Image (cartoon, helix red, strand yellow):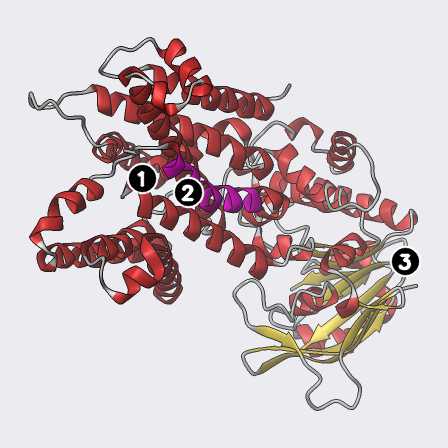
Amino acid sequence: MNRSAWTLAVSLLAGLLAIVLGPLAGSVSIDGWAEAARWLSEPRSEWGPDTAIFELRLSRVLLAFLAGGGLACAGAVLQTLLRNGLATPYTLGVASAGSFGAFLVLAFPAAWFASLLGATLTALICALGSLGLVLALARRSQRVDGLLLAGVTLNFLFGAGVMLVRYLADPLRLAAMERWILGSVEALHPSEAWALLPWIGLPVLGLVAMAGDLDQLAFDEELASARGVTVRRVRGLGLLAAGVLTAATVARVGPIGFVGLLVPHAIRAGTGLRHRMLIPACFFAGGSLLVVADLAARSMSVGGRNSELPVGILTALIGGPCFLFLLLRRSNA
Amino acid sequence: MALIGCALRAGYGGCAVLDGVDFRLEPGQLLCLLGPNGAGKSTLARALCGLLPAGVGGAVASVTAATSTQASSVEVDGDRLARLSPRARAQRIGFLPQEIEPSFSFRVSEAVELGARVAAKVSPQAESVTAALQAVDAEHLADRRLDELSGGERRRVLLASVLAQQPKYLVLDEPTAMLDLEHQVQLFEVLRARCDAGMGVVVVTHDLNLAAQWADELVLLHRGRIAAQGTPQRVFVRETLSSVFGSRFQLLETPEGRPVLVPR
């Protein structure tokens, strides 16, 4: 087996372990395997409180896994298509835009767009709109770092938008909004994870299906075109997939940063640039990373409060310095 | 059976670069495309590969037939290029641009494999990668990273990746730039061997002497039109060359009867 197959195998194994072992761990100790067996075999009415805890954890693990996998794949494809190792849903402002959309719905659930579109579609419209804007701005600026600067600008704008919504919103809704904006993968039932599955699964499968074209595009655009890749179509579909992945994730779990930046970098070192390996490996590795991060976050009690740390804070704390490291390494090169 | 360009017109943003060029490349022929900067060599090369109408590479260019009575078109072995699927086109015509900008650090073997994937013939990819690297004397580089190589090594690896594509016709834009003398000659030896095996090869080059030594046929472009065409002996005529390049050169001849140009 070569290096790239090993990387995929290891990340697949990590993903399976995260899903199987994740629900067993937590701040309250339960007999995990027995509860898992009971959860699978017995009807809900005969469950004890520990079985309910197991189900809560399982829901949470599944949601974290899908969200982490989706964000990592979105990061991987954005880095390829925009030919920039620092491009991610967050650095480009796509996630902020999606957050803004979802936040709007959360703040004004009775508004026409909220009842018509719901959080995910509103987030999707904002995310794709901002992706278009960031690309247009980058093209006009003609600078190497135009893309990142445009992303920073949009991050500021949508950050201001989020503050404005918070200011205007009904104070009774602020607690829920606050919780969401910190980024959390809390889920009460596995169906909450299943609801996210098509939004993550379809784009990821689509990306795997066009993996060969993405490889050629990562190498050189003109050469890719000479080798039979319809560059515009592949780029359009890839950006759409990244937008859907980001918006759906952000709408459900709030802004959880840096998974989309770090995972593709780490995985690419192992798989190389074959997207047929890179995309699935990113999915499994991103999923397991967020499950582990959430496990760490919910096991911590911060400042003596008996509440768990939102995972978004943890990933941001770890991811910020890593981003800086990548930025410095790139400018030295 | 030939790669034929008919009344090719192309321009960038309203400014015509190619002004009705007719072109023909037979299988087994090594043809060099010559001309001063801005003569339209690269534009012609791209048009022959069907790359212009898509407007790739940032430049907005298109092949049009605005004022001509005859429509601009490229035909490959009797098929209109525009009617072929992109993949079928890539299997017949291989193209190597002047510059390649990989966005990430590719391994040499990965880069060559990208070309091998396009090949119509089903053969083990590892083998065709090795064979292509061998052909350009770059086998020992297989596990290196492309961005660690010297300019010349990089050009050779890129040539290998297009050779791995196993096209019927090959269009190379400045493949000898940055190559040392030994590798320039080696490159033309490789191309000559491919021509003997039935491939048709177009080489865009600024090196008039290399072209004169190796080419079966030369096409000399000037301001988007063909200034001269034919064997090196026919094209390397003092009047023709000085009308295109100015007169600061001396025209000599090798013992084999090939023309040589010495600047002065």
For the residue pair B121 and A21, the one nearer the viewer reads as A21
Name the quadrant of the N terminus of chain B: bottom right
* Range of residues picked out in magenta: A191-207
Q: CA distance from mark 3 to mark 1?
A: 50 Å
Does A205 lie within the magenta span?
yes
For the residue pair B105 and A37, the one nearer the viewer reads as A37
Does A285 lie within the magenta span?
no
Name which residue lies at 26% across and 58% down: A154
Chain assignment, label 1: A
User: Farthest residue toward the front?
Assistant: A45
Residue at numbered disc 1: A327
Secondary element at image label 1: helix
Task: Give the dominant element type of the magenta stretch: helix, strand or loop.
Answer: helix
Quarter of the rendering containing residue A294: top left
Quarter of the rendering containing residue B263: bottom right
Residue at numbered disc 2: A195
Chain assignment, label 2: A
Q: Are marks 1 and 2 in contact (CB under 8 Å)?
A: no
**Amino acid type, callout 3:** Pro
Q: Are marks 3 and 2 in contact (CB under 8 Å)?
A: no
User: Eyeballing the image, is A316 above or below A147?
Assistant: above
Name which residue lies at 63% across and 53% down: A223
Residue at numbered disc 3: B27
